[in-house]
Image (cartoon, grey):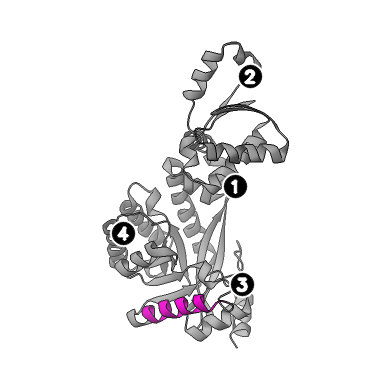
Amino acid sequence: MFLLYVPEEKLKEKVLKVVLEQQVECKDYGEVLLINSDDSFVAQVLEELIEDEEEVADSLKLVRVEPQDFKNVASLLKKVFKAQTLRDLLEETLYKNISDIMYNSKTFFQAIVSVKDKNIYAFEALCRSPFPIYKIMQLGGHVAELMDEFCRYKALREFSKRFERYEHKVSLNFHPKFIKEPLKDLGDLVSASVSYGIAPERVVVEITEYEGMDINALKQLRSFLKKEGVLVALDDVGEGYSGLYQFVELKPDIVKLDMKLVRNCHLNPVKRHVVHALVSVCRSLGIITLAEGVEKREELEVLLDMGVDLIQGFLVAKPDPNPKLEETVKKVRELMA
């Protein structure tokens, strides 16, 4: 059994909705819910809540209880209110299991292709583990920092093994928002790439989750990477004001058009106008444009007409731990013939 402290009515309604759907026994004591279920159900409820609202992790409190605990209600309530927040609880659990998560994680590579050369330009490295990486990053904290760093170094090592004979670039996700010393981390990353035999010029650092970050801190990162010869890509440009503001201020080497703009752009004239405007601005500034999430031939045709430089998506190639280079190039040339 679990006692769940839910201070907000809106969150409580969401919990009760899942309880009702799963037909789990639950008693309502105002801000405290008694859930008579096992760990798997509770994990499912919490996962759904965190996915909807990140701040849930800081407000919910969860404590496991036994029938004998109810003999002293005052002591029990005290135990609930002193319980860890969900964020602390999950981080502690993840920290205890971090070695297993790392051991069972795999690096997948997704091809990014050049429209001009009709060839592979780079591979984006994507870390996959039994526990979704993006949820670890959402929680932030020490575990997120460890996992973020581990994924990048693992990607560099795997990339150096698989693509040693080639000149493709590797694109690595970087989450400065969740890292205490991002400048130091980037310095270590450049050193690591050299030690693996990957020249800095072959590395693309893709800055993600930058919303709300101090622009001067981001400019520092950009300046450092430029000096080292590393390319900078800015993710999700076109998604709201924040992405456009960072784009204007940072002037990255590569702009990744927000996936929502790319999806079904052949059916939506407004999306086409926005994409066309972004591509035109980037071309005038000498910035490379990358359209990600391309899944349909019709989308590709629109993007090619607009002059997008790079294409990434399932239409071209899915993420794969062992990408098939020749097959991908052949497919690209057929699609762009």
What is the C-alpha distance between the residues marked 3 and 2? 51 Å
Mark 3 near mark 2, Cβ–Cβ under 8 Å?
no
Mark 1 surroundings: few (<14), some (14-19) or many (≥20) residues within 10 A: few
User: Residue 174, position in %: x, y?
Assistant: 42, 57
Give the amino acid at mark 4: Leu
The C terminus lies in quadrant: bottom right
Which sits earlier in the primary sequence, circle 4 or circle 1?
A: 1
Give the amino acid at mark 3: Glu
* Res. 246 visible in picture: yes
Give whichever of 191, 336 is nearer the camera. 336
Callout count: 4
Q: Secondary structure at mark 1?
A: loop
What residue is shown with label 3? 295
User: Residue 40, position in %: x, y?
Assistant: 66, 36
The N terminus lies in quadrant: top right
User: Residue 312, position in %: x, y?
Assistant: 54, 72
What residue is shown with label 4? 218
Give the amino acid at mark 2: Glu
Give the amino acid at mark 1: Asn
What residue is shown with label 2? 66
Q: Which callout, 4 or 1, points to the residue nearer the camera?
A: 4
Q: Residue furthest top?
A: 71
Assign the magenta stretch its main secondary structure: helix
- State the residue at coordinates (42%, 69%): 202
Which sits earlier in the primary sequence, circle 2 or circle 1?
A: 2
What is the C-alpha distance between the residues marked 2 and 1? 33 Å
Residue range of the region highlighted in magenta in the rendering = 268-282
Give whichever of 23, 290 is nearer the camera. 23
Which sits earlier in the primary sequence, circle 3 or circle 2?
A: 2
